[in-house]
Amino acid sequence: MEPTTSQLVFNPTPEAFAIGVAFVVAVMGLSFMAWRRSGWRPLMGWLELLRVIIAICIAITLLQPEWLETFKPETKPTLAVLHDVSGSMTTKDVIDKTQPNAEPKSREEMAKPLIEAKLWEPLKQRMDVVIEPFSSAQTPPTEGTDIHAALAGVLEKQPNLKSVVLISDGDWNLGLPPSQAATRLRMREVPVFAVPVGSETRLPDVELSSFDVPTFAVAGKPLRIPFVIDSSLPRDEVVVLEMKSTSGEIITKEITLPAMSRFQDAIAWKPEKPGDVKLTLTIPKTPNERYPENNTQEAPLSVRKEQLKVLVIESFPRWEYRYLRNALERDPGVEVNCLLLHPGLGKMGAGRGYLDKFPKDEELTKFDVIFLGDVGTQKGQLTAEQCAALQKLVRDQAGGLVFMPGFHGFQASLQETPLADLLPVIWDATQPRGWGSTAPGKFALTEAGMRSLLTKLEDTDEASARVWSTLPGFQWYAPALRAKAGSEVLATHGSESNQYGRVPLIVTKTYGAGKILFMGTDGAWRWRKGVEDKYHYRYWGQVVRWMAYQRNMSSGDKMRLFYSPDRPRTGDVLTLNANVMSVTGEPLREGAVIAQIAAPSGKVSSVRLLPAGEEAWGLFNGTFTPNEPGEHVVQLSCAEAGSSLETKISIQGTSREKRGQPARFDVLKEVAQFTKGSVLDATKPQSIVDAIAAIPEAAMQERRLPIWAHPAWAGLLVVLMSVFWIGRKAAGAF
């Protein structure tokens, strides 16, 4: 590339110029005097002239001379037009100011004239115009907006980037903050011209924002499905929700949507037959609603037959034990076994469902939930080995364990066993037998308890809270000081406190693959007063099913598969846990457990599940990251067990896009301001083109050669000074 101009330039400072002139003048005076003292010898005259030349070169060095060449750019700069194609751009909230009563346009319709090639034709003589869509890198890409990736990507792909036009609603919901990409653009002096589309205020709308269908339900058992509705309607509206099942059932529910607020409730359904169904919940379009597209959600549900195995271990038949056993025996989905370990009894309890001894390992693994009553390590009760077996059942076999202490205080001795790690509360060693009172105590639900399905005694949160406030009280509670870290307190004592706050009464915890519940009073049987077994039966039934949930995701004779999270989405790391029994019925300790996972597209992935640890009790686990939404077929096999298991896992699409939500102009304004760009009006396409055209032409490219710092210049000075000193020695001047 030939330079347009070439010239020698200096970059002096006033101080350097003054010093240089003074230095040259001083050297000239010194050289003149030296030549005169030599008697005007010709050789000395030439040497002193060389001294002046060296001084002039040093002075020139102080002026920092450079050889400057300018070039005209060989390539045209690039204008990148980035337009948002994410799901939120389908929101119809753009109102024509000239026709306020007309149907709103979608944001993508508003952006369409801005991405037509003919609009940018006037600029193509000065710059290359690149028009690119963007959304996200997830699956599907339209269900997310990554503005940072779009800006950073075009900066990497276009080395001669002049400016960026960003057309979007600003609904950034994935990736790094756009401001980080804006920082890089600013350093490259690339302005961003933001073109917001959409409405900054939400139009009258009703959105079904949540429909929490569980992974599976039990045939013949009522199912409560929570939902959340966001309303921006100007006034209250009475609507009739409709839930359809692919099995043919239609459930309706009348609700009143409060204006400009969020509404939470649940719809009840009782599936009658086992099988896989899809549930669809729909809100009818209201008269004032402008965007009905977000009024429907659907989710799969597996309806199964149920036969949960429960073991109740107690020291003596107290009232809570009797009514708990009766309630569980009445439940058609539960098989109850009991083990009485009363130290004073000569023999174990006998009769239907009673065990005469603590079950062996292979028998213990068949139980889904263990209720551990007022039992410890006293003579004739649990041994250290049996406590360790219970620990492994929870940790490795996804079993559930319910601590139900009593006033004898036998559970205090469990603090010296492996079960101490499972207890979700700190035990008061000074008061092992707990606390009693003549005045009945009351439960007080925490915020977590208000939300929990375990404590739902009525269909709505409000009704459930009223029931808890009116339940008959209890007269004894366990010596729990506080909940351990990682535990969740659902209920506390309504009036009693200690140095840590209110006394915890109902506490849950996850331990390994299983779940723990602590019930800090033995007075739940009193809830039957006036209502028979309504609330007592419902509460313990919910506890059993919650604790056995994971164990029953998918089970066979010798294999059981459970996973987390229980409602996985695309991009989630799905942890697969398998309980595997050997051909002899004992937990398998070593072996090859393979999961073949077929995605809806037909792509098959193979995951090898490894033993969870040296002490793993038949537990194998591995991880899998689904990239496709839809139903995945899992084939689990193990040669050592001589068994296989097939099940389905439904993967939900990860949608961060909110149709109907206000546009986020603030995000776009921040990017424009940070890059020294501006915010432009989407309704005036020509003004956008004019703003880009007003950007100054690209500056001439420069190439500078710093002569003063060049090795050749330094070499010249060394040579001149060497010649000077050698000449003086030859002339006899020292």
Image (tube, grey):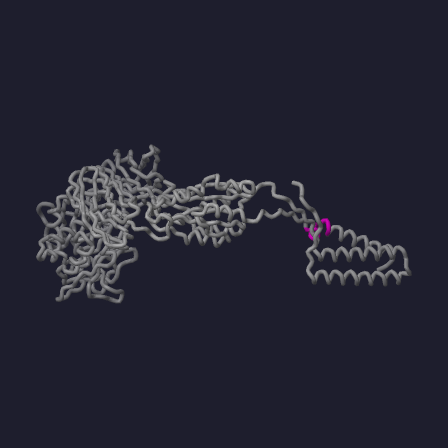
Q: Quadrant of the N terminus?
A: top right
Residue extending furthest toward the top: 602
Residue 318 counted in the magenta span: no
- Judge by depth and name the residue closer to the eye, 36 or 487: 36
- Tell me which residue sits at (74%, 56%) in the image: 60
Whether residue 388 is visible, yes or no, is no
Chain part drawn in magenta: 706-713
In this rendering, would 145 be left or right of 489?
right
Residue 708 counted in the magenta span: yes
In this rendering, would 68 be left or right of 40?
left
Q: Residue 113 occupies which quadrant of the picture?
A: top left
Q: Quadrant of the C terminus?
A: bottom right
- Judge by depth and name the residue closer to the eye, 382 or 179: 179
In this rendering, would 732 be left or right of 447?
right
Count of number-bearing discs: 0
Q: Is the magenta stretch mostly helix, strand or loop?
A: helix
Residue 552 at x, y = what percent? 22, 42
Residue 640 at x, y = what percent? 28, 35
Residue 318 at x, y = what percent? 11, 56
Residue extending furthest toward the front: 98
In this rendering, would 162 be left or right of 668?
right
- Judge by depth and name the residue closer to the eye, 275 or 578: 275
- Judge by depth and name the residue closer to the eye, 464 or 35: 464
